[in-house]
Image (cartoon, coloured by chain):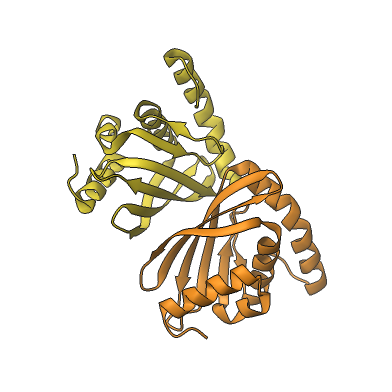
Chain colours: A orange, B yellow
Amino acid sequence: MPHDLRSFLDEWHRVVAAKDLDGLAPLLAEQVSLGAPPYWPRFESREVVQHLLGVILTTIEDFTYHREWTEPQELALEFSGRVGEHELQGVDLISLDEAFAVTRLDVLMRPTGSVDALRDLVAPRMTEFFAIRGGGAG
Amino acid sequence: MPHDLRSFLDEWHRVVAAKDLDGLAPLLAEQVSLGAPPYWPRFESREVVQHLLGVILTTIEDFTYHREWTEPQELALEFSGRVGEHELQGVDLISLDEAFAVTRLDVLMRPTGSVDALRDLVAPRMTEFFAIRGGGAG
């Protein structure tokens, strides 16, 4: 478990680079919520957000972080990647709680064509996940 | 002309709140480029970017800035708004030159339905602008 902002960021980058989905869970608060690029309603709970981030991370190719802005509990992390031939630029807006766990994560991307291509690959895997687990996007 | 980051931000927020499009031009470098939410190719030049920002600002309703991250020459500014019934969340990623003028602006928004609604209103006005001016999106 990270004990300060620097150790949170080090572990976040390690988990993303390694696509270490088990390592993601301890970085997320139990009641974390995620705002995904294609949808306005938010995804809620550590279990759902961990799974969704895992699907996204294993779908986007050449995922690379760039500029990084940090305030004590609020972060903005720019990234790039592609989905097939669709290049994309994105930013993670992250809120941390007092224990340096993610309570809120908003993922914004451009352009919309790349978001649509990503959604077409991610949505069926999330739908299958919700079917097995029971329940929906909250 | 702003002489430091604080005066740039003050003037940027004043211009956006007042929708003062003439006031926008001095904040933009001559060779500014803008990455818009729906498209991957970038819009180039002060004249084009000023016009596009003006159209966007007069189209998004209830435009409001929220979290703000600042590094000496790199900024991330979160905003919210709506297009008719479509709520949206966005972030401006801004690079400044030595004279505190914007050289690069990336606008990322979610969800895609709101970006599509915004594009449907903005694109015809930009197309008319390019027809009158001559030239394209570069």
- Of residues B48 and A128, the one drawn nearer to the viewer in this rendering: B48
- Of residues A112 and B99, the one drawn nearer to the viewer in this rendering: B99
Q: Is residue A22 left or right of residue B70?
A: right
- Tell me if residue B81 comes above or below residue A136 in the rendering: above
- Tell me if residue A31 comes above or below residue A110 in the rendering: below
Q: State the image quarter where residue B86 is shown.
A: top right
Looking at the image, which residue is at 24% across and 34% down?
Answer: B26
Q: Where in the figure is residue A47, as x and y percent of width and height?
A: 67, 76
- Of residues A82 and A118, the one drawn nearer to the viewer in this rendering: A82
The answer to whether residue B111 is visible is no
Looking at the image, which residue is at 61% across and 76% down?
Answer: A24
Looking at the image, which residue is at 36% across and 32% down?
Answer: B31
The answer to whether residue B58 is visible is yes
- Of residues B112 and A26, the one drawn nearer to the viewer in this rendering: A26
Q: Where in the figure is residue A71, as x and y percent of width and height?
A: 36, 68
Q: Where in the figure is residue A63, as x and y percent of width and height?
A: 61, 58
Looking at the image, which residue is at 17% across and 46% down?
Answer: B3
Q: State the image quarter where residue B49 is shown.
A: top left
Q: How many callouts does the rendering have?
A: 0
Q: Where in the figure is residue A53, as x and y percent of width and height?
A: 64, 66
Q: Is residue B54 left or right of residue B13?
A: right
Q: Quadrant of the N terminus of chain B?
A: top left
